[in-house]
Amino acid sequence: MSDDRRGSDGSDLSGDSRTAWHVPEEDLRAYTRGDLTPPRLWSADTHLAACARCREALAAFSDPAALEAGWERLDAELDAPRPGPVEWLLVQLGVADHTARLLAAAPVLRRSWLGAVAVVLVMTVAAANTVQVASAPTLFLALAPLLPLAGVALSYSPALDPTYEMAVVSPMHGFRLLMIRTVAVLIVGLGLNGLATLALPTYGLHALAWLLPALALTATGLALTSRLGPVLAPSLVGGGWIALLAVARATTEPDATLAPFTVAGQGVAGAVAALAAGLLYLARDRFDASRLPLTDFTDRNAA
């Protein structure tokens, strides 16, 4: 008896003992073109997964270039980085994919930075609650404005940001990129400071006296960054703030409120923040066209 068997449609049923039939040639051709429709498509998919003979026949009908392109797309998809929880949340909130990736890569959104800031704030809050001062928690008010400033330095520092080169060469205006990361810094920094403030209920509104100085220091640091770079500028501003507090402490009674945290000092801080914001806006183009010390805000048009 001959082993050559034919199905009702004329297809060869011999060969692979695990299958009772094979996909007809016209179906294989339609399969490669994407023209095969259900239910024949479903049958072909199931059969090809188990039949090496039909897969070989399918390869003969396939376009090698299209097949290679398909493998390349698959490799690219498998190698594509998976978004982390922060990046996923930003995308869900409507932030563009590329913007969310630049934000998520910022050092200030990493657990190490957030943990360090949280520990510092907890320690200062504990100290303020342990040593009751009649006027305000001086240590907390002195330290809280420096945290957003340090976050800005981290977010655009070539020495500290592992994604610095990617951020600089990204197809985005340098000032816009700086503002995006600054907003992220302020949201995180001011949010953590605000939570710490809630732990100081006995001081009332005095515990919020860090807010305007924080905005003033951050805006001043950004305005100077266009000329001094993202490391030197915040360092000078932070040093100036510490020197100011030292002078205020030396000229103030022990139980009195330091000048930067009085009503007049808050007004000065608000004015400095507004002035620095204006100067920052006027210098916005320097973040693309200048070669700054300790940084690399290069002219992308010349590249």
Image (cartoon, rainbow, N blue to C red):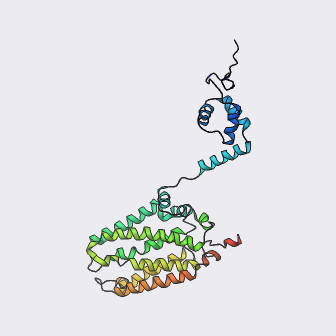
Query: Residue 102, how many percent across, how many down?
Result: 55, 63
Residues 3 and 172: in front is 3
133 with respect to 236 (left or right): left
Query: Residue 28, how many percent across, how many down?
Result: 68, 35
**Tally of numbered discs:** 0
Taking the spot 63% from the left edge, 32% from the top edge, the residue there is: 48
69 with respect to 126 (left or right): right
111 to 195, vertically: above or below: above
Q: In which quarter of the image is the N terminus?
A: top right
84 with respect to 27 (left or right): left
Query: Residue 183, how many percent across, how many down?
Result: 48, 71
Query: Residue 79, how many percent across, how many down?
Result: 60, 49
Q: Quadrant of the C terminus?
A: bottom right
Taking the spot 50% from the left edge, 83% from the top edge, the residue there is: 276
59 with respect to 235 (left or right): right
17 to 87, vertically: above or below: above
279 to 301, vertically: above or below: below
184 to 48, vertically: above or below: below
Q: Can residue 268 be seen in this view?
A: yes
The quarter of the displayed image where residue 114 is located:
bottom left
The quarter of the displayed image where residue 66 is located:
top right
The residue sitting at the front extreme is 8
Q: Is residue 238 visible?
A: no
The residue sitting at the top extreme is 1
